[in-house]
Amino acid sequence: MEVELKQLNADLQFLSQSLPDPSHHALLCKIQLRVEELGKLAAAAPVRRSKVEDMSAEVVDSNPYSRLMALQRMGIVENYERIRDFSVAIVGIGGVGSVAAEMLTRCGIGRLLLYDYDKVELANMNRLFFRPDQVGLTKTDAAVQTLSDINPDVVLESYTLNITTVTGFETFMSSLTKKSFCPNKEGSGVDLVLSCVDNYEARMAVNQACNELSQTWMESGVSEDAVSGHIQLLIPGETACFACAPPLVVASGVDERTLKREGVCAASLPTTMGVVAGLLVQNTLKLLLGFGQVSPYLVRDGDVFFILLPELLQMGYNSLKDFFPTMQMKPNPQCSNVACLKRQEEYMLAKPARDAAAKAKMEAEVLSTEEVPLHDDNEWNISVVDDVELDGPDTRSSDVLPEGLTHELPSADEFHEATPDAPVADNDDLEDLRRQLEAINSA
Amino acid sequence: MEVELKQLNADLQFLSQSLPDPSHHALLCKIQLRVEELGKLAAAAPVRRSKVEDMSAEVVDSNPYSRLMALQRMGIVENYERIRDFSVAIVGIGGVGSVAAEMLTRCGIGRLLLYDYDKVELANMNRLFFRPDQVGLTKTDAAVQTLSDINPDVVLESYTLNITTVTGFETFMSSLTKKSFCPNKEGSGVDLVLSCVDNYEARMAVNQACNELSQTWMESGVSEDAVSGHIQLLIPGETACFACAPPLVVASGVDERTLKREGVCAASLPTTMGVVAGLLVQNTLKLLLGFGQVSPYLVRDGDVFFILLPELLQMGYNSLKDFFPTMQMKPNPQCSNVACLKRQEEYMLAKPARDAAAKAKMEAEVLSTEEVPLHDDNEWNISVVDDVELDGPDTRSSDVLPEGLTHELPSADEFHEATPDAPVADNDDLEDLRRQLEAINSA
């Protein structure tokens, strides 16, 4: 703007010198004054940055992507610009979800889908993101306002709804399967769902939708005493789903009975929520852009190494001790969620092809580094073990918690047992249920 | 606002019904229209929340402190409102410092002192906090604008200066010692200094100031490949200072030669910086409000347990592996920084009194829990060991790094060796230097 104003003034000056009639000078003076006023007005107007066609790695102050594209030169990410092809859905725009949305927006994610039904209150001001002047707006509207100002390149879709209601769940499902953003991409319409909700029912709804759509998702949470948190990666059929086992394990000692009373609220801190959002989005970037330990790698289980997809399945954060325990959870073959069982079955059916591909990849890597090829008696004791062994009821590792961890919520089984009239969760895949009943009747 | 408007309208309605003359009705209609317009205008104006006299624990949507005061009911913090008595100085308002400032502001810290000389650029938009409409403002001005809107209760002081210049350093020192905020408090004018700078010289300046003032501080940093970071607590005389040993250890494999070239910038991510800021401020809160493992506790060193003040001395964050190594660093008796040596001497002089107090406290605690009193042959093998043993050159633990850690910067000694004409750092305490020279001359 300053440059254009200078040029305009220079042109006017030039014109002034080239005009012979003094009466013209008076008119020009007037025009110059008007331009000056206009310049002042323009300078006071808030600067909204214009859209950027392509991400550039050029190191200039005006390039909003230079520090991100530098990840390529640093050898961290192979192709950063791919981030523009990804869609991420964030359910719950509270203390964790709003910060996760801002981080992904500043990273230049392609498309964000935001879900919440709550309004901004002054009581939310102890967490990052929302401002006092947004009090009274829905969290989705306030978020779109802030995020579109920060980065107009991101496609923002906001859904002001409660996913635990029947119509809310239907809209949630159909929004996840809309494929207009990247029509030729495999899978559902989004690449990842981030659950940033604060209650059990909403987590069960996200779990149901993701199991039905075979949609990879990440769960996050912060304890009610504000000093612990967790993140967890869930891949339907491959890892424990939310109904397989209580996945909310954090090193926390809060008695839940102290909560849920009239006039009592949970504590929260911007620090714990910021750390959890940061870990959640960092692992989102690793998963989407393929860096760090997310691609197939070796995990130790007793004395055998076996191939497992993502390194990070569940991670806790205990801020009092700066302790970050991690653990893996395999799916429960007795899971009460029918869609989960269906995904487990599909995962097992695809096993021979997956094992062959993994073996071929590993052998190729071993050969390419000119080391000894893979044998049964190899130095690292590597063997591609049978998933059935690991998935058996006696190896259900989710029951065994590392030292210092406790279950934050009742197990899903306890939850279901509490409603004996409905032994299967309400929102289970009805078609599947019908097929099961038919099989029982025909036997 | 809505409530007041409703009441006003109700009053007008009431008046309208009680007036017999129709000519009055026309006038009232006009008044009502004007009020409606006024209401629209008022609703569009940005809401700035008013100052809050006392922090309340009342659970209402309009209370910005309810979720923080809940930390007391949860048994995490004894007296949260004490946070209003603390002053924290933040040096460097970039990707880590700005987020740390926002977190402390939302937590209701008493007073923040902000130091930076840089301007906001579009190239900073890949990190949290600054907005595109702030481009061109100094980072200190932009931060004060945003922070005062978020929480008007916080006293904000901004210093637009470079602390590595002579006058900048002088202003920095005098601002830290100004005691007008809490005149009766012990120590310097601030309770903690947070270093969030991005270069070696600025860290050395913070180190010098804090050594001279015997000021506890925390150092933070993010690696140039954006995927690792660290925080570190420094207590002059008690822990290693920045010149004692290279304290910037992160699990990073970047070749520094790839940087520092024309047209090349460091990579950065909002995730890594958000996590580092979160860990930094979480430990600030633990230190100031006295919760978690910050008060005197027991640390294992070989087979002996010894008393050490803060648990967290240095902590790394490797986001690629979600690995958080921690380590402690004792001061170097051969440190090149004269002020550091002076603080080490003071710390040793105060040792008998400190040991006696710690022993008395421990015995009181043991007695209060009605357990066996402390003996030489106690179950936990606890002994209050001599600091001299630990501080000897052979036990300088800073030379021994845990697995996976490398020094990010050259050691301070290498830095000093590079300037043989100035064997002592330029900004060392001059008076002390003069005294040393006099001692040599008189010998």
Image (tube, coloured by chain):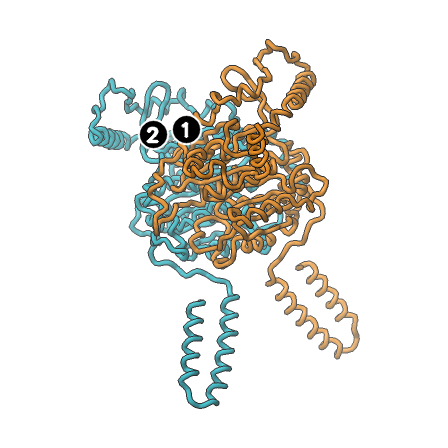
Chain colours: A cyan, B orange
The residue that mark 2 highlights is A308
Residue B433 makes an appearance in the image: yes
Dot 2 surroundings within 10 Å: few (below 14), some, or many (20 or more)? Answer: some
- Pointer 1 and pointer 2: residues touching (CB < 8 Å)? yes
Residue at image coords 38%, 29%:
A440
Q: What is the CA distance from the residue labelled 1 to the residue labelled 2?
A: 10 Å
Image coordinates for residue B387, horizontal then vertical, percent: 57, 21
Q: Is residue A182 left or right of residue B438?
A: left
The amino acid sitting under disc 1 is Gln
Query: Vertical placement of B349 versus A204: above or below?
Result: above
Q: Is residue B84 left or right of residue B391?
A: right
Residue at image coords 58%, 18%:
B386
The residue that mark 1 highlights is A328
> On residue A307, which mark appears?
none
The amino acid sitting under disc 2 is Leu
Image coordinates for residue B281, horizontal then vertical, percent: 55, 39
Residue at image coords 53%, 47%:
B163
Q: Mark 2 or mark 1, which is nearer the start of the sequence?
A: 2
Residue A409 makes an appearance in the image: no
Residue farthest toward the front in the current orientation of the protein: B442
Quadrant of the rendered image containing residue B408? top left
Quadrant of the rendered image containing residue A19? bottom left
Q: Nearer the viewer, residue A299 or A160?
A: A299
Q: Nearer the viewer, residue B113 or B395?
A: B395
Q: Chain letter of disc 2?
A: A
